[in-house]
Amino acid sequence: MTKQVLTNTFAKDITKLFSLSDRTTNSTLQYFTNKIIKDIKWNTDNKMTKIQNMEEECLNLYIEHKEHGVILDNDRILQLQNDIEWNQHQIKVNDDLERYFQTASEQLFPKVHADSKAIAGSVDKLEAKYQAMQGAK
């Protein structure tokens, strides 16, 4: 078996610190690496929802101003725009961090990822057949 060249620093450190051939250690490391990735995705989704809500609030403030003559709260709109920008910046950081840990996971657990891709490919083929059947009805 040839040794895989690891380019991700986290993956390199993990292989130095832990024995991946130990089943329990391997399982634990997979669990926590996946948990980190899922937590980053959850945080990103949460921030995107916040951004949508703030954008809607800005629009509603403007609609109230245009349609009902309510004085436009420029300070609130500015604050919302700043918060939107701040959350967007955090999402960019999250994206980079998620890619970093995803790469580490793929390098540390290549068989798990290969199996997962094979299963996803099978499900995609089944979905295509199902959609073709639905279109034929």
Image (spheres, helix red, strand yellow):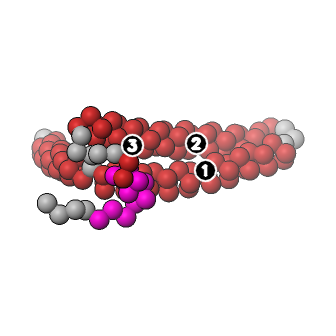
Q: Secondary structure at mark 2?
A: helix
Which residue lies under the disc numbered 2?
A: 47
First to last magenta residue range: 5-15
Residue closest to the far right: 71
**Does any portion of residue 116 appear in the rendered image?**
no
Classify the position of the C terminus by image quarter.
Answer: top left
Q: Nearer the viewer, residue 22 or 8?
A: 22
Q: Secondary structure at mark 1?
A: helix
Q: Nearer the viewer, residue 114 or 4?
A: 4
Classify the position of the N terminus by image quarter.
Answer: bottom left
Task: Give the amino acid type for the residue marked by disc 3 in the picture.
Answer: Thr
Q: Main secondary structure of the magenta part?
A: helix
**In magenta stretch: residue 110:** no
Q: Which mark is residue 90?
A: 1
Q: Position of residue 92 (x, y in %)?
A: 56, 55
The mark that comes first in sequence, 3 or 1, is 3
Which residue lies under the disc numbered 3?
A: 33
Quadrant hosting residue 28 = top left
Mark 2 and mark 1: Cα distance apart in space:
8 Å
Q: Which mark is residue 44?
A: none
